[in-house]
Image (cartoon, rainbow, N blue to C red):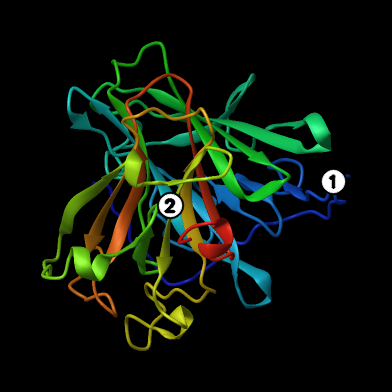
Amino acid sequence: MSASCSRPNRPLFLILATAALAAHGADWVQPGLTTNQPVWGIRGGLLWAVPPAGFRGGEPRGLIRVGYPVLPGKRYDLVNFIAVEPVVKGRRGFSELEHSRLDNVAGKRIRAASKEGSTNLVAGTLTRQSGGREELEVTLKVERFDNGAHVRVVVRQRSDRPDEIELAVFREEDSAPLEYCILSATMGNLARTRQLWLKDRVVSSLEVYSNYTDAGFAPHRTYSLTELHRTPEGGVLVAVTNDEEHPASVFPFPNSRLWHYGGIKVTQYWAKAPGAYREDLQVAVNGRYTYWLSKRPIPGGVAFENFELRERFYDGQTFVFGVTGRTPGELGLGR
């Protein structure tokens, strides 16, 4: 399973030009238009980036980096990573851990693509949809995996849903047949996510892994579609949250900001739109007792690390990932 480390908060500054608000309130961030870094999204909402851009220094390669205005003054910080992990004949690929064939460095290359080719400074396609909402679409090309998988991910973000992105997965023509293409939120330990919100209960990592004190990954736990929350519209929603009152007050390493989460409490979630899921859909989590590449126990106990939806692969399948300051109850969970 993919893993990620967090470094001291040394922001990679985004050089943003002044841009007027769109007619419907979306202030888009687009490379080549409003920034000179490969960062996309809506100011005030979710931003996402691919290397070399990011929200902290030392972020691993091979990941989509997700930022949100969690810091005082609504400043942005890293909240999580999304890894691409295709499965071929039972062999799972890891976009973060596998070495690139281009430079033999850990992390498959992820680059935005346009008709002119692959380059990090692709503005994406911004369109006006029905009702006046806007939608930004960006295609990401992912380097071929060691198991023969070769995929691309199309990321879409809507002006009326600024806190989330939709990720659609497609198999390239030269790819090996896929069993799954899992998109995994890989770094729950940064925000110490210990609560998993299902249909009619909240599962605590402290209970699931009550006896786990090893330095590796705790075993996966999966929950089927029947255990997942259904929205009034017929979609699926599952979330994770921190269980602490003031998470920013916790410094995991004394006199250091290593692994420090300095933001407000947020809800991170995966969702499926009505009609966009099959009966085999399930959520999977694993946990860690210590931080990645260290023997330092996570303050407060074991937390969920990887958080993902799993569904047998079909071309164009979509997953929605979101980060919001709203509580699970405000999203309709826990009722």
Amino acid type for the residue under numbered disc 2: Phe
Q: Secondary structure at mark 1?
A: loop
**Between discs 1 and 2, the one toward the N terminus:** 1
Residue at the disc numbered 2 = 81
Q: Quadrant of residue 225?
A: top left
Up-down: is 57 above or below 148? below
Residue at the disc numbered 1 = 24
Which residue of the protein is positioned furthest toward the top in this rendering? 173
Amino acid type for the residue under numbered disc 1: His
Q: Position of residue 56 (x, y in %)?
A: 49, 63
* Residue found at x 79% / y 53%: 17
* Residue found at x 47% / y 52%: 269
Q: Is residue 327 left or right of residue 288?
A: right
Structural crowding at the residue carrying mark 1, measured as other residues with C-alpha within 10 Å and reported as few (<14), some (14–19) or many (≥20): few
Asked whether residue 290 is in view, the answer is no
> Residues under labels 1 and 2: Cα distance?
29 Å
Q: Position of residue 154 (x, y in %)?
A: 54, 30
Name the foreground residue: 52 vs 183: 183
Q: Secondary structure at mark 2?
A: strand
Structural crowding at the residue carrying mark 2, measured as other residues with C-alpha within 10 Å and reported as few (<14), some (14–19) or many (≥20): many
Is there a contact, CB below 8 Å, between mark 1 and mark 2? no
* Residue found at x 26% / y 65%: 205
Count of marks placed on residues: 2
